[in-house]
Image (cartoon, helix red, strand yellow):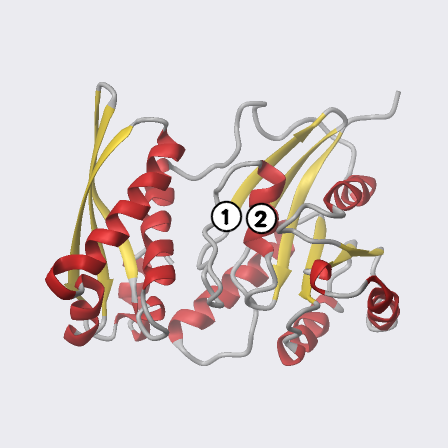
């Protein structure tokens, strides 16, 4: 019988490569928020995949790209910090919408890492099967990956093959987390993230990147959870957009977020949302830290 394996796997890639979608697929639970807008993930999200012969601890990370803004620099630093923690690095590439500058930047950084790197070519469901071999061949010549795998995180195609390949490169060792544990982050973190996801999905291009969410109160009593949360934006005009005409937009954000939060907590939720202006917070390192980035 082969020995049990365990270890950390950092999922890295350009913005919108599908990292969070993959983590949610692997866990069978929605931990990482997703949207079609890039740079949705701002933190390192840990998710534990339990298998009969291994335990894989995945680290979902913010999208890596060249940037100068204080917030985005912090996010990219978070992604690179996982290189030291990981036993295996999983580079994800969006074959439907390549981000060549960000991918080149990542490959350059990976070249200094002496750990196994596996490449996942994501969104291959959007291509003809005949197109995939040429893409695989191209990437095989870019970097000495341990494996180059085609998959669709959205539909689950190729995910089992990916897990098997990762397991091959994990060190032998005992489980790192209890069997019933999916993540190391508290419920309050995911509540804030689910609200922020709805801001991303329901508002225009400018608002999501200027918004942050804090949970001000989280009280459980019986089968009910009372939550007060604040959506922070940078300008008064943004506050008006988030609230919407007659409060319609804020109400929709609340309704959609509450639905996800109730699934997460498996309890009835009363959610009260506020909107506050924190001037230029994305350029203020203290504010960025205050909002948990």
Q: Which residue is mark 2?
A: 59
Q: Give whichever of 26, 252 is nearer the camera.
A: 252
- Please tell me how crowded label 1 is: few (under 14), some (14-19), or many (20+) other residues with Cα within 10 Å: many
Q: Is residue 225 left or right of residue 190?
A: left
- Please tell me how crowded label 2 is: few (under 14), some (14-19), or many (20+) other residues with Cα within 10 Å: many
Whether residue 264 is situated above or below residue 44 in the rendered picture = above
- Is residue 104 at all visible to an observer of this figure? yes
Indicate the quadrant where residue 84 lies: bottom right
Q: Are marks 1 and 2 in contact (CB under 8 Å)?
A: yes
Q: Residue at x 76, y 47 (%)?
A: 158
Tell me which label, 1 or 2, sits earlier in the chain: 1
Q: Is residue 218 left or right of residue 9?
A: left
Q: CA separation, marks 1 and 2?
A: 6 Å
Q: Which residue is mark 1?
A: 45
Q: Position of residue 171 (x, y in %)?
A: 78, 38
Number of numbered tags placed on the structure image: 2
Q: Give whichever of 254, 7 is nearer the camera.
A: 254
Q: Position of residue 89 (x, y in %)?
A: 70, 54
């Amino acid at each position: 019988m082969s020995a049990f394996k365990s270890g950390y796997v950092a999922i890295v890639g350009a913005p919108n490569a599908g990292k969070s979608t993959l983590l949610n697929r692997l866990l069978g639970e929605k931990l990482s928020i997703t949207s079609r807008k890039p740079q949705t993930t701002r933190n390192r999200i840990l998710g534990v995949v339990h298998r009969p012969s291994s335990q894989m601890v995945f680290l979902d990370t913010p999208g890596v790209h060249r940037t100068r803004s204080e917030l985005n620099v912090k996010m990219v630093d978070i992604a690179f910090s996982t290189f030291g923690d990981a036993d295996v690095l999983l580079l994800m590439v969006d074959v439907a919408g390549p981000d060549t500058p960000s991918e080149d930047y990542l490959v350059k950084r990976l070249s200094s890492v002496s750990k196994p790197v596996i490449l996942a070519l994501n969104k291959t469901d959007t291509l003809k099967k005949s197109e995939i071999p040429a893409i695989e061949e191209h990437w095989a010549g870019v970097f000495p990956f341990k494996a180059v795998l085609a998959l669709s995180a959205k539909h689950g195609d190729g995910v089992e093959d990916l897990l098997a390949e990762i397991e091959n490169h994990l060190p032998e060792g005992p489980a790192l987390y209890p069997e019933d544990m999916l993540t190391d982050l508290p419920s309050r973190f995911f509540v804030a993230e689910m609200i922020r996801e709805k801001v991303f999905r329901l508002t225009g291009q400018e608002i999501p990147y200027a918004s942050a969410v804090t949970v001000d109160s989280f009280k459980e009593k019986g089968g009910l959870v009372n939550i007060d949360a604040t959506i922070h934006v940078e300008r008064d005009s943004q506050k008006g957009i988030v609230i919407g005409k007659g409060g319609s937009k804020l109400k929709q954000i609340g309704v959609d977020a509450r639905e996800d939060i109730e699934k997460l907590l498996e309890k009835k939720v009363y959610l009260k949302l506020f909107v506050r202006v924190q001037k230029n917070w994305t350029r203020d390192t203290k504010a960025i830290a205050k909002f948990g980035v």
